[in-house]
């Protein structure tokens, strides 16, 4: 899945981040227009509310005169703008990254735009449908089926091993898999269990713990977001903590983002590298 400039001198701008590769039975997701105002429940964040309503965190924050980093409080009233119908493709984006941005399934966005796993190239300036153009919108949320049947990975789309690692990590980030201490399967992962499993599915054997996984990689220290963006490649590992005593690990997917099993009470998700939670070093597995 590629984003390509429409000029004749097109260049590849992003990894093929298709979260395909898992044979998954899915039904079409009808996007319901949310109420104009909602009351924040305990534990909800701008990110979780935006994802549930298929809008971006930036749009939700703007509608409420908030910063994207602001925290919400229980019983706070939040305005929910209607979900957008289309998205204009920007440099470096893929169908998967756009779907993840709006809390949608990649399979649905492909279908709504007459694309497929094998024909998923998009171009800068294209308008992607974010809703089914052939289906009237409905407020009946019962049409949303969140109990998709998951099966074992049979094939992965991508030209390189790094792409396949990113693809699979993104797939798990879209499935609501919970953090489970000691978890090593898609029924629940901890941070190093997720890394070990994703790499194992791509033929790479890693040690079980974060400290053990340090032994499987060549490392590069980082101290800023720009360090990470300039030095990490999609498919690399990010480690938090001192060498020999790391306490967290994640899979870098490019564009300053990573997939991780964060902590108890949270699901496997895509997160942004930030100065507030800065990785200590990059780990690259020898190909």
Image (cartoon, grey):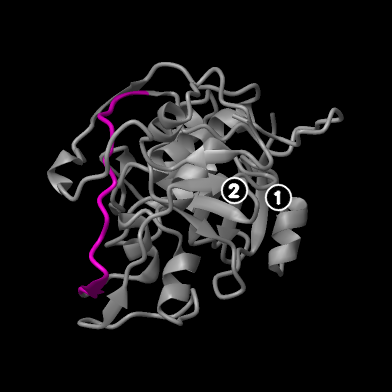
Relative to 194, is 118 on the left or the right?
right
The residue positioned 77% from the left and 55% from the top of the image is: 230
Residue 33 among those drawn in magenta: yes
The residue positioned 42% from the left and 69% from the top of the image is: 60
Rendered view: 215 above or below 238: above
Magenta stretch mostly in which secondary structure?
Answer: loop
Q: Are marks 2 and 1 in contact (CB under 8 Å)?
A: yes
Q: Position of residue 38 (x, y in %)?
A: 23, 72
Residue 171 among those drawn in magenta: no
Instruction: Using the rendered image of the protein, determine whether residue 260 is visible from the camera's viewpoint.
Output: no
The residue positioned 43% from the left and 43% from the top of the image is: 130
User: How crowded is the residue under tag 2: few (<14 C-alpha within 10 Å), some, or many (20+)?
Assistant: many
Q: What span is colored magenta in the figure?
A: 23-41
Q: Which mark is residue 251?
A: none
Mark 2 → mark 1, Cα distance in angstroms: 7 Å
The residue positioned 56% from the left and 25% from the top of the image is: 120
Instruction: Using the rendered image of the protein, determine whether residue 243 is visible from the camera's viewpoint.
Output: yes
Q: Quadrant of residue 1?
A: top right
> Which residue is the site of mark 2?
252
Rendered view: 227 above or below 162: below
Q: Quadrant of the C terminus?
A: top right
Rendered view: 225 above or below 97: below
Q: Position of residue 198 (x, y in %)?
A: 46, 35
> Which residue is the site of mark 1?
232
Q: Quadrant of residue 7?
A: top right
Q: Earlier in the sequence, mark 2 or mark 1?
A: 1
User: How crowded is the residue under tag 1: few (<14 C-alpha within 10 Å), some, or many (20+)?
Assistant: many
């Amino acid at each position: 899945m590629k984003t390509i400039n429409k000029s004749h001198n097109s260049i590849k701008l992003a990894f093929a981040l298709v979260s395909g590769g898992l044979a998954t039975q899915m039904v079409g997701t009808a996007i319901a227009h949310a109420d104009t105002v909602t009351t924040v429940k305990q534990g909800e964040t701008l990110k979780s509310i935006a994802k549930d309503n298929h809008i971006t965190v930036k749009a939700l924050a703007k509608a409420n005169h908030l910063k994207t980093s602001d925290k919400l409080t229980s019983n706070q009233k939040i305005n929910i703008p209607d979900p957008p119908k289309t998205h204009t493709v920007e440099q470096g984006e893929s169908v998967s990254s756009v779907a993840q941005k709006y809390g949608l399934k990649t399979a649905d966005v492909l279908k709504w735009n007459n694309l497929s796993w094998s024909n998923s190239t998009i171009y800068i300036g294209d308008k992607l449908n974010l809703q089914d153009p052939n289906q009237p919108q409905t407020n009946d949320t019962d049409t949303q089926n969140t109990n998709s049947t998951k099966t074992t990975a049979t094939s992965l789309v991508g030209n390189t091993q790094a792409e396949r690692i990113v693809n699979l990590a993104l797939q798990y980030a879209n499935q609501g898999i919970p953090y489970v201490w000691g978890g090593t399967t898609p029924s629940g992962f901890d941070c190093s269990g997720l890394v070990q499993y994703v790499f194992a599915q791509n033929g790479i054997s890693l040690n079980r713990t974060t400290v053990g996984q340090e032994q499987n990689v060549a490392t590069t220290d980082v101290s800023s977001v720009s360090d990470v963006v300039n030095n990490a490649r999609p498919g690399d590992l990010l480690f938090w903590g001192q060498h020999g005593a790391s306490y967290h690990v994640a899979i870098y997917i490019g564009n300053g983002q990573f997939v991780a099993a964060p902590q108890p009470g949270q699901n496997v998700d895509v997160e942004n590298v930030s100065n507030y939670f800065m990785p200590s070093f990059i780990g690259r597995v020898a190909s």
